[in-house]
């Protein structure tokens, strides 16, 4: 590098010395003497009173001063750049700069000699790092894929109260989970009365090949199968206290399984198509009609108030949506048993498909959203349609024995532009009409065919509560319940129930939140606990910690 700078100086010097040869009589000896009389080299171009930034050679002169320190001025603090330069003066300037370069070069040689061992060690480390970087580049994760994860811990417990006792009929219709004459609260406490610590883990692999498409793979694991929370545990009497995060794979606790695998891509400017071997209904909707958080407490508050219209069926399927501005139309199909070859128990579009078909029309802007949806469900024994934690025992039975269900839902929300004391408001309502025949319902055909079930909810959320980033919320509603028992006059529909939840989220860091929560179920079994005036209810509390990475 120093040698290169010397080469750069050479043409400058030659240019300075190129004028016609000067004779001894032409030498400006007084100028040389005055120039040499300045003993101190200048360290900044600003020391010259007659050199301005507008001069054409300002930058070149500044570089000579700062890099080499070989430029001196006259005793009066001037450079006199417009004065003609003789060959003698040019030689003096060049000699000063070459001497300085020699000093720097000698100093570098001395330092290189002194630190020879250390430099050799550093050189070896650099070579080693280069080899490791090469290995990492050869084995790096796909540059088109992003990984993100959510880990959730929950610890909580139930409290069951009331003196209501089961009749023989209630015992049978509750699946024998409570004995005739036994208090519902005692049976529930024996099954779901322990304090439990559970987890759920989600890993999302999002891949894009064009920047506009999406290939999503979701891996999921959990250990809620034997927990006290909801219908995931088939031995639990109460199903409505199911958590939204409650999950356990078909292979059992702690097993990791593929929970989503679908590809989404645009068709022109306004259409988007989705297809997947494991896709969920809401993955194929252009708009979700709720801003009430889907990861808070009870599962029943995460379906827009209409679990029949939004059953979130998971399986093989495809869909398409059209969107223009805030207006959108979506249509999709999902078969829970779409991977099965026997048409009696699976396939696409067969009696065994356990399938749902949904059409939604929606409109939204920054503060407001509204959607209406219609869903046709072929439950196939309850494999599609209402999840166990979203309805009373009679409502779940109605879905399990129906040959088909026609559902409509109307859901929407409003949210303020700025956080404050005004909360966002999400609400929804759903109505389901059941059809049944002897092959699906057997002796209960009259009770199921023509039956109707309903549901509704209202959810409120406040943001930046007390501390910026924290949030609070509450919801109230009725899980899906029987409102009409079809042609069966012996079964009077009296299945109403109420559910509440309250929570406060502490945003500890950008990636960690802690959410204490309470919930209350006034009539967790609906009509199947109302044979007397005595009551049975469920109060619960938990702390949920969420890690996002």
Image (cartoon, rainbow, N blue to C red):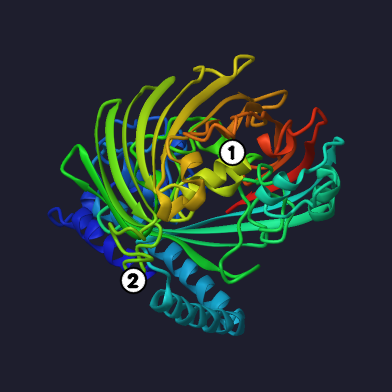
Q: Secondary structure at mark 2?
A: loop
The correct choice, above or below, for 417 with respect to 184 in the image is: above
Residue 477 image offset from top left, x and y in percent: 61, 27
Badge 2: residue crowd in 10 Å (few <14, some 14–19, many ≥20) = few
Is 54 left or right of 169, judged from the image as shown?
Answer: left
Is 149 left or right of 253, judged from the image as shown?
Answer: left
Q: Earlier in the sequence, mark 2 or mark 1?
A: 1
Residue that appears at 18% across and 39% down: 269
The correct choice, above or below, for 412 with respect to 20 in the image is: above
- Judging depth in this view, the residue of 398 and 18 nearest the camera is 398
- Picture disc at residue 300: 1
Residue 391 image offset from top left, x and y in percent: 58, 40
Closer to the observer: label 2 or label 1? 2
- Judging depth in this view, the residue of 423 and 526 nearest the camera is 526
Residue 418 image offset from top left, x and y in percent: 54, 18
- Judging depth in this view, the residue of 89 and 339 nearest the camera is 339
Extreme top residue here? Answer: 422
- Picture disc at residue 342: 2
Residue 53 image offset from top left, x and y in percent: 34, 32
For the N terminus, which image quadrant? bottom left
């Amino acid at each position: 590098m120093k040698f290169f700078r010397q080469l750069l100086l050479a043409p400058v010097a030659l240019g300075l010395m190129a004028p016609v040869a000067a004779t001894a009589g032409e030498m400006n000896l007084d100028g040389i003497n005055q120039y040499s009389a300045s003993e101190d080299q200048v360290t900044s171009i600003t020391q010259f009173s007659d050199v301005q930034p507008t001069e054409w050679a300002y930058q070149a002169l500044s570089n000579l001063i700062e890099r080499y320190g070989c430029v001196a001025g006259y005793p009066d603090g001037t450079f006199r750049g417009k004065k003609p330069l003789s060959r003698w003066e040019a030689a003096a300037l060049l000699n000063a700069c070459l001497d300085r370069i020699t000093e720097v070069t000698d100093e570098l040689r001395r330092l290189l000699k002194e630190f020879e061992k250390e430099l050799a060690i550093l050189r070896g480390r650099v070579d080693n790092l280069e080899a490791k970087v090469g290995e990492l580049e050869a084995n790096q994760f796909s540059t088109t894929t992003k990984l993100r994860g959510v880990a959730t811990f929950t610890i909580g417990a139930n409290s069951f109260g009331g003196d209501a006792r089961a009749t023989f009929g209630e015992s049978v219709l509750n699946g024998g989970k409570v004995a005739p004459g036994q208090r519902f609260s005692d049976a529930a406490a024996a099954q779901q009365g322990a304090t439990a610590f559970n987890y759920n883990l989600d890993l999302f692999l999002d891949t894009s090949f064009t920047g506009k498409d999406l290939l999503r793979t979701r891996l999921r694991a959990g250990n809620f199968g034997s927990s006290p929370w909801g219908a995931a545990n088939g031995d639990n009497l109460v199903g409505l206290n199911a958590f939204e995060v409650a999950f356990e794979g078909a292979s059992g606790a702690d097993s990791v399984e593929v929970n989503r695998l679908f590809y989404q891509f645009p068709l022109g400017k306004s259409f988007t198509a989705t297809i997947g071997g494991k896709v969920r209904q809401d993955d194929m909707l252009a708009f979700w009609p709720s801003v009430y958080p889907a990861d808070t407490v009870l599962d029943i508050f995460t379906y827009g108030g209409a679990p029949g219209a939004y059953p979130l069926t998971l399986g093989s399927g495809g869909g398409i949506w059209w969107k223009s501005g805030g207006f959108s139309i979506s249509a999709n199909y999902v078969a829970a048993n779409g991977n099965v070859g026997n048409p009696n128990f699976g396939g696409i579009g067969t009696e065994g498909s356990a399938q749902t078909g949904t059409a939604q029309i929606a409109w939204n802007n920054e503060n407001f959203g509204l959607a209406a949806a219609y869903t046709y469900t072929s439950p196939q024994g309850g494999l599609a349609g209402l999840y166990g934690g979203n309805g009373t025992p009679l409502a779940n039975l109605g879905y399990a024995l129906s040959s088909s269900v026609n559902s409509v839902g109307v859901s929407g929300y409003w949210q303020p532009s700025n956080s404050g004391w005004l909360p966002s408001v999400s609400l929804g309502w759903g109505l389901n009409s059941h059809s049944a025949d002897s092959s699906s319902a057997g002796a209960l055909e009259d009770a199921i065919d023509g039956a109707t079930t309903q549901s509704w909810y209202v959810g409120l959320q406040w943001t930046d509560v007390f501390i910026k980033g924290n949030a609070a919320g509450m919801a109230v509603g009725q899980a899906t319940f029987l409102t009409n028992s079809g042609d069966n006059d012996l079964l009077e529909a009296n299945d109403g129930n109420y559910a509440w939840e309250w929570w406060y989220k502490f945003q500890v860091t950008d990636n960690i939140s802690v959410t204490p929560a309470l919930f209350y179920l006034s009539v967790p079994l609906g009509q199947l606990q109302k044979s007397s005036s005595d009551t049975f209810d469920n109060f619960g509390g938990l702390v949920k910690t969420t890690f996002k990475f």
